[in-house]
Image: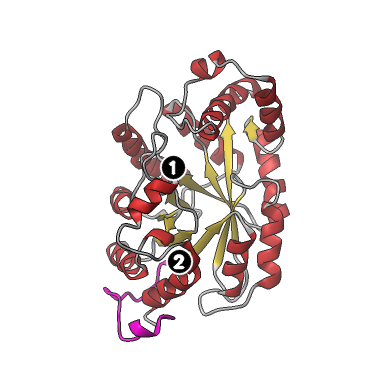
Amino acid sequence: MARVRLSVLDQSPIRSGGTAAQALTESIELARHVEQLGYSRFWVAEHHGSASFAGCSPEVLLARIAAETRSIRVGSGGVMLMHYSPYKVAENFLLLQTLYPGRVDLGVGRAPGSDGLTAQALAYGSPIGVDYFLNKLQDLRAFVSGERPATASFSRVKATPRVSELPEFWLLGSSEQSALYAAELGMRYSVAHFLNPRESHELAGLYRRNFRPSRECSEPCVNVGVFVLCAQTEEEAEDLALTRDVWRLGLERGEPGPLPSVEEAKAYVFSDEEVALIRQRRKHAICGTPERVRERLQTLAQQHEADELVVISNCHDFAVRRRSYSLLAQAFNLEAGYR
């Protein structure tokens, strides 16, 4: 199997006691940090109305991150296309590609990235919902590439500025539908193990079996989004993982909030049901020392037949988050010139 490349998916997490402004500043600093370590891509997520994540506009944040870095690829992980005009998204990313040629990835997702009411606010004035996602996706690809869109009434519409090299197009997902869309349209596919760890390898297989070559992809191309916490000891990794466990329980109770500290997580009183749920989830969690994490990630990459992993490492202390990416880079022998 080819050498595994490492990339980053950053959600701009807001920590307990912190602010959204701090979270965004840390995203920019993290991008500079992982570029120096030799990571291949830096993707930013889209969330709306969130007390947990500060990144609501990938295009805006990407412009700043690209300006603060030199060579690492930057992209959306991803734009929630159901809310937006494909034409406007196309022009945003063509503009980014014009400003930062050869470095831009356009990652698109089907999820709302919000609650139902916020999704309605995002769709203000438009009756077109997720049912039209496939049509929007086809139109977006056509606008970016300069081809005729699927919507016949837009046949004379051209997105600008035109570029000599197109952004890399990725479909992100954690469901059979996303895998099939990516396969049938001949797109690159980023499968979200961090959202669907039990089935993500099956989704990668479904994509490969149904893949149809396209102009942008002659063969299947898969990377895997995975949650990782790398620490110097197993005990520290367990403490860091507990913060995400407690945060996720709050999210599922309808009480999303900032990422708690280790001390706050340890003070949480778990019910028996929550203990059992966390124990089950930890079977899929990739947390531990560099050696243990490397072994598990290499196995994960093999299961998905992927040579790239896109890593999320959310924890309360930004210095600890930076260190997690550093330890992981050392474990995989990344080099600054290797992309």
Pointer 1 local density, CA inside 10 Å: few below 14, some 14–19, many at least 20: many
As helix, strand or loop, the secondary structure at mark 2 comes to strand
Foreground residue among 278 and 22: 278
At horizontal 37% and vertical 47% (from top left) the residue drawn is 118
Name the main secondary structure of what is drawn in magenta.
loop
x%, y% of residue 271?
65, 19
Classify residue 136 by image quadrant.
Answer: bottom left
At horizontal 46% and vertical 70% (from top left) the residue drawn is 137
Answer with left or right where residue 184 lies relative to residue 117. Answer: right
- 3D distance between C-alphas at marks 1 and 2: 20 Å
Classify residue 144 by image quadrant.
Answer: bottom left
Q: Amino acid at mark 2?
A: Glu
Asked if the stretch drawn in magenta spans residue 162, the answer is yes
Asked if the stretch drawn in magenta spans residue 107, the answer is no
Q: Amino acid at mark 1?
A: Gln
* Residue 305 can be seen, yes or no: no
Classify residue 329 by image quadrant.
Answer: top right
Pointer 2 local density, CA inside 10 Å: few below 14, some 14–19, many at least 20: some
Between circles 1 and 2, the one closer to the viewer is 1
* Residue 97 can be seen, yes or no: yes
Q: Quickly name the residue at label 1.
A: 11
Establish if 282 lies above or below 295: above
Answer with left or right where residue 32 lies relative to residue 208. Answer: left
Establish if 109 lies above or below 257: below
At horizontal 44% and vertical 50% (from top left) the residue drawn is 42
**Residue range corresponding to the magenta coloring:** 149-169
x%, y% of residue 247?
52, 29
x%, y% of residue 217?
55, 74
As helix, strand or loop, the secondary structure at mark 1 comes to loop
Answer with left or right where residue 213 lies relative to residue 92. Answer: right
- The quarter of the image holding the N terminus is bottom right
Q: Quickly name the residue at label 2.
A: 168
